[in-house]
Amino acid sequence: MYQDEIVLCSASKYTQKYYLNEDFSELPQGIKEELKIMCVLFTEDIGGVIILLFDENGTLQIKTEAYEEDILYDEIGSVLKIKQIREDKKELFEQLELYFQTFF
């Protein structure tokens, strides 16, 4: 886990797994499904790992990682995809930040 940050969820192309932090199990099912779909689709399109986390200010951050030897990871595509996700999911992210600041 990242220091002073709380992971909301993540997905990995390498392990073919999705993770939702159990601290967020009370989120509505629709939001949990939307997060899962978004993360899994990202790793299918781009590769690597995507991590959504809250920083020390309660702001939702998106981070990606990839194995150094992963030649299929699309680094440029990841930047563009994250920008698209931020635009498309702006309202969802604002709601998640409000949820986080209220309950954590």
Image (cartoon, rainbow, N blue to C red):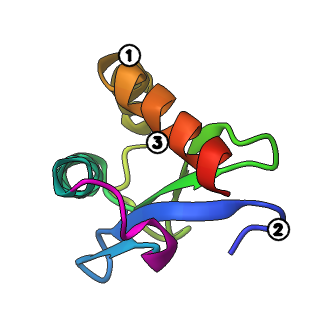
- Which is closer to the viewer, label 2 or label 3? 2
Say which element carries label 3.
Answer: helix
User: What residue is drawn where x is 23% and y is 78%?
Assistant: 16
Dot 2 corresponds to which residue? 3
Tell me if 88 is positioned left or right of 71 in this view.
Answer: left
The location of residue 100, given as percent across then percent down, is 59, 48
- Answer with mark 1 or mark 3, whichever residue precedes in sequence: 3
Q: Is residue 79 visible?
A: no
- Answer with mark 2 or mark 1, whichever residue precedes in sequence: 2
Dot 1 corresponds to which residue? 87
Q: What separation in Å lies between label 2 and label 3 (alpha carbons)?
A: 24 Å
Give the residues in magenta. Answer: 22-28
- Answer with mark 2 or mark 3, whichever residue precedes in sequence: 2
Front residue (pair 16, 74): 16
Relative to 3, say whether 86 is above or below: above
Front residue (pair 85, 92): 92
Q: What separation in Å lies between label 1 and label 3 (alpha carbons)?
A: 19 Å
Dot 3 corresponds to which residue? 75
User: What residue is drawn where x is 82% and y is 68%?
Assistant: 3
Q: What separation in Å lies between label 2 and label 1 (alpha carbons)?
A: 27 Å
Q: Which mark is residue 96?
A: none
Any magenta on residue 14?
A: no
Tell me if 85 is positioned left or right of 37 in this view.
Answer: right
The location of residue 48, given as percent across then percent down, is 39, 62
Say which quarter of the image contains residue 4. bottom right
Tell me if 51 is positioned left or right of 43 in this view.
Answer: right
The location of residue 60, given as percent across then percent down, is 59, 40
